[in-house]
Amino acid sequence: MTPGVSTCWTVIQGAAAGRSEDREHFARRYAPVVQAYLAARWRGSPLGTELDDAVQEVFVECFKQGGVLQRVDRERPGGFRPFLYGMLRNVALRMEAARARGRERQPESSCELAAVEAAEASLSQVFDRAWAQSLIREAAARQAQRAAQSGADALRRVELLRLRFHEGLPIREIAQRWQADPADLHHEYARARQEFKAALLEVVGFHQPGTSAEIEQAGAELLASLG
């Protein structure tokens, strides 16, 4: 990334310094990932009723004086994602221990703790998938925003992607709906995919800055994680 380009580190630094707009930006970007992880971790547990409080607690930990954002290592492999995962896990463990103390028994009982530990690998996958989905949504929103500025043809390509991926419609069926030439629509579909890829790489570069090759690789891995 070139100097002066905003990245997640720009936002993290501003949030750690107390800038309200950066804190709002940070919370808006990462809240869906935080919520998805904790919801999966506490599914079927009484702590599931405290999900909203737990999400708030994560951001308190981030933003408080001397909080975790002031200790982020920018050189850590993988960028901010693994740091966020580790911090989330620690907050969850602390809340589980606090609840156990409140009930005056061993932390979440040995069988409950064992269940959480056994599920850690799948919880990591839940986090990775939630992270990927969050970036995909962000890229789609960025593409749609640009399309709105570019005009009807660009907006039509956004709708084409939605019909193809979200509704699973083949190009030939979309062509019938739109009374369009399938060959032309295939051309527009390829263009739409390139526009989405450009938006996605920008989003990936924001969250995990690096060289063009590194960002390309990270984007490919992100898409692969969604299966």
Image (cartoon, helix red, strand yellow):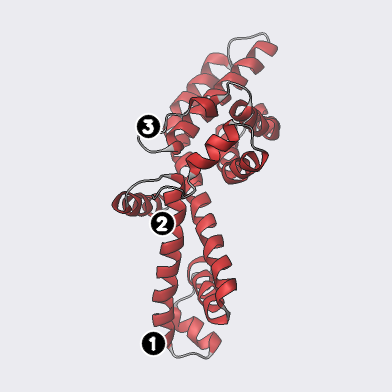
- Please, which residue is most extreme toward the left here? 213
Question: Is mark 2 in CB contact (under 8 Å) with mark 1?
Answer: no
Crowding around mark 2 (Cα neighbors within 10 Å: few <14, some 14 to 19, many 20+) is many
Question: Is mark 2 in CB contact (under 8 Å) with mark 3?
Answer: no
Q: Position of residue 80 (x, y in %)?
A: 45, 37
Q: Amino acid at mark 1?
A: Ala
Is residue 40 at all visible to an observer of this figure?
no
Q: Amino acid at mark 2?
A: Leu
What is the C-alpha distance between the residues marked 1 and 3?
47 Å
Q: Position of residue 36 (x, y in %)?
A: 57, 41
Does residue 173 appear to the left or right of 96 in the view shown? left
Q: Amino acid at mark 3?
A: Arg
- Please, which residue is most extreme toward the front here? 4
Q: Which residue is mark 2?
A: 201
Q: Residue at x 67, y 39 (%)?
A: 20
Q: Which residue is mark 1?
A: 183
Does residue 50 lie above or below 188 as drawn? above
- For the residue pair 83 and 73, the one nearer the viewer reads as 73
Does residue 46 appear to the left or right of 111 in the view shown? right
Q: Residue at x 42, y 29 (%)?
A: 73
Tag 1 secondary structure: helix
Tag 3 secondary structure: loop
Q: Nearer the viewer, mark 1 or mark 3?
A: 3
What is the C-alpha distance between the residues marked 2 and 3?
20 Å
Number of callouts:
3
Q: Which mark is residue 76?
A: 3
Does residue 225 lie above or below 98 as drawn? below
Tag 2 secondary structure: helix
Q: Residue at x 48, y 85 (%)?
A: 175
Hey, which quadrant is residue 107 in on the image?
A: top right
Quadrant the C terminus occupies: bottom left
